[in-house]
Amino acid sequence: MSLHEKFDVSESAGNYSFSRPVTADDLIEIAQLIAQSRLREKEHFTSPELVGDYFTAAMRSLEQEVFVCLFLDNQHCKIAFETLFYGTIDGASVHPREVVKRALQLNAAAVIIGHNHPSGVSEPSQADRRITERLKQALELIDVRVLDHLVVGNTGYTSFAQRGIL
């Protein structure tokens, strides 16, 4: 049973108004119903194409290079999508320690990393391959899997997983 079916409630911008007084037990039940609803709404990332579309929408038009992480739980549901490092038009410094730290803070089970190439070309460089390997090694120490690394250009993206690089 949904929150709206069980309680006569109206909702506007995340604020709830009830037509009758609610008890402490009602509040607990309401919180559980809201939590269950949010769990159902979580985004699942089950294919490189879904991730590629998501990353492309977020990074295609940026004029400087950025490095992002999509932190996931065990079912590959999004915990957070964050830009961790900003760079210039031709590079961004990535620090594995900070990625590991954030993955621990979020209790992530897996990550998908990515960055854009403002030049427009989505072909991975040797530096891209090296940082992927360093991140993979660092995250393995805390049992966090690196599922993919995407490089986003103007006309699309390149997935390390699809290419068999990862």
Image (spheres, rainbow, N blue to C red):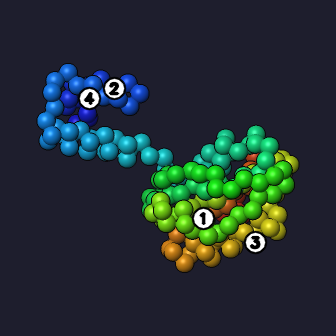
User: In terms of secondary structure, where does tag 3 sit?
Assistant: helix
Foreground tag (4 vs 2): 2
Quarter of the figure with residue 5: top left
Which mark is on residue 130? 3
Foreground tag (1 vs 4): 1
Which amino acid does the dot numbered 1 rest on?
A: Val
| Residue at point 62%, 76% (across, down) | 137
Task: Confirm or deny contact between disc 4 and disc 2 (CB under 8 A).
Answer: yes
Q: Earlier in the sequence, mark 3 or mark 2?
A: 2
Quarter of the image containing the C terminus? bottom right
Q: Is residue 23 left or right of residue 121?
A: left
Q: Is residue 81 visible?
A: yes
Which amino acid does the dot numbered 2 rest on?
A: Glu
Q: In 3D space, how far apart are the residues under numbered discs 2 and 1 (Cα atoms)?
A: 37 Å
The correct choice, above or below, for 96 with respect to 33 in the image is below
Q: In 3D space, how far apart are the residues under numbered discs 3 and 1 (Cα atoms)?
A: 15 Å
Within 10 angstroms of label 4, few (less than 14), some, or many (20 or more) residues?
few
Which amino acid does the dot numbered 3 rest on?
A: Arg
Give the residue pinned by disc 1.
99
Within 10 angstroms of label 3, few (less than 14), some, or many (20 or more) residues?
few
Within 10 angstroms of label 2, few (less than 14), some, or many (20 or more) residues?
few
Residue situated in front as seen by the camera: 131 or 88: 88
Q: Earlier in the sequence, mark 1 or mark 4?
A: 4
Task: Confirm or deny contact between disc 1 and disc 4 (CB under 8 A).
Answer: no
Q: Earlier in the sequence, mark 4 or mark 3?
A: 4
Which amino acid does the dot numbered 4 rest on?
A: His
The correct choice, above or below, for 126 with respect to 113 in the image is below
Q: Position of residue 23 (x, y in %)?
A: 13, 36
Task: Confirm or deny contact between disc 4 and disc 3 (CB under 8 A).
Answer: no
